[in-house]
Image (tube, grey):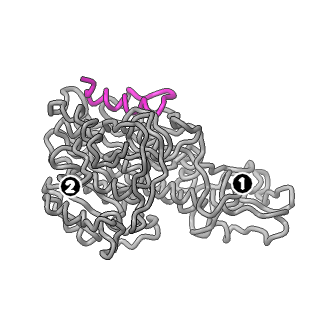
Amino acid sequence: MRLTVAAAVLTAALAGCASVPATRAVAGHPRNIIFFLGDGMGMNTLTAARIYAVGEDGELTIDTLPESAFVKTFANDAQVTDSAASMSAYMTGKKVNNGVLSMSSDTPSIAPGADAGGNKTVGRCSGGRPVATLAELAKQRGMAVGVVTTTRVTDATPGAVFAHVCNRGMETDIAAALVPGGAGYNSALGAHGIDVLFGGGTRTFAGIGQGGIRADGRDLLAELRAHGFRSALNSAQFNAVDAASGAPLVGLFAPENLSYDRARDPAREPGLAAMASKAVDVLSHNPNGFFLVVEGGLIDLALHDTQAKRALQEVVAFDETIKATIARMRVLDPGLKNTLIVVTADHDHTLLLNGYARRTGKTTPTNPGVLGLARNVSDGALRLDADGVPFTIIGFGTGEHRVQGKRSSVPALTDAAVTADDYHQEAVVRTDAGDGTHGGSDVFLGAIGARADSFGGTIDNTRVFELIKAAAGWEN
């Protein structure tokens, strides 16, 4: 069958979800749920970020969360998941094939075709159906919903919150799912749709000739404004938005992904912490509470590029966002009696901590720290590999930088070289540039607030959906 977000089959499949009577938050259960997702933030990356920021014996905010678990991340068809399958599992409780967004397990991932504008479009989908997401369940109960990301808002992780497609590459279809009343709108989001949307990706909202890639010529931002959405396209407009109003708000601050936190222009792009804080202030006007997803998406981008310094800086920015959001919620909800906050990752990467390195402490302008060369514990001398040359503490299992032949055939590494902002760490298996792969290891989950004690042990990513649903009292 032919399947797009606008297709009749989607409306029919979601009708059962939409038929649930709207009810207020359940007494004794959290009214507010915040789901933090560090894209690609595996255990090794998290450990390296801790050492980078606060040293081996320090603590990130993530480390202080009182409840914790390990999460299995495999996809329906793959030992190593992609972001589409893993986030779909968190949002729907269903295992799906890599590339699929919030559809049933029998939905095959199809390679999207391209229309005249070069936009990726749907091909033929043989079977499968949309599955309700946590955002849609929240909307059915009268709650506000927000999505905040440092990637394109139509990328796989944010897209799995509010869209249902056979392939994550169908980003103009994913964007159309956000526009109430328009072709392709996801009606399970209710009459008014998502309440807050922050990130990048203006290209998927505009037509060809207007700076976008939409072959249909639609201006989705204009359509959203016509439905009462406020909009912001830079930091000045973002800062001017009155958070005292609960009116829906969309902020898109780049044509594609946002910039790395340490490289962004604050005049053009707000930081993740500011976006999350603004989202909370807008969403908290809803008396029935809210469901908010906050993604640190550029952790994954840097890891694919084997740029450890960028990745660790993104983890730190993500952690600072968690800290600021918890502090803000403690003001709005003292004791977090009505708020559940869950922090996790969608998958691992192949970042490694090598070589019996001596403790480094945190990275400073004068101390390379974990980004530097491995040194002996006994005397601090450089550790040498079988070719007699130094190597970095951080490496990757897969990546673009691998010396062909003996490492002694190229200039020896120095701390100055390997701590540069855009240095690509060496890898065991050489891949094309930007194609460092995900890893298949379990990831960490931390939780705080109401019903956080339901998380523990080693659980499947689909179980996270069930636990959030049960904590919120959405079982019936």
Query: x%, y% of residue 273?
Result: 35, 57
Residue drawn at point x = 73 percent, y = 57 percent: 374
Residue drawn at point x = 26 percent, y = 43 percent: 8
Mark 1: few, some, or many residues within 10 Å (few <14, many ≥20)?
A: few
What's the amino acid at mark 2?
A: Gly
* 208, above or below 373, in the image: below
**Mark closer to the observer (2, 1):** 2
Determine whether the residue tagged by mark 1 lies in a helix, strand or loop. Answer: strand
Sequence-first disc among 2 and 1:
2
Query: x%, y% of residue 282?
Result: 19, 53
- For the N terminus, give its image quadrant: top left
Rendered image quadrant of residue 107: top left
The label shown at residue 151 is none
What's the amino acid at mark 1?
A: Val
Quick check: can you spot residue 394? no
Compared across the picture, whether 287 is left or right of 2 comes to left
Please state the extent of the stretch shown in magenta in the rendering. 454-476
Determine whether the residue tagged by mark 2 lies in a helix, strand or loop. Answer: loop
* 188, above or below 302, in the image: above
Question: For the view shown, which residue lies furthest in the top direction?
Answer: 476
The residue that label 1 is drawn on is 429
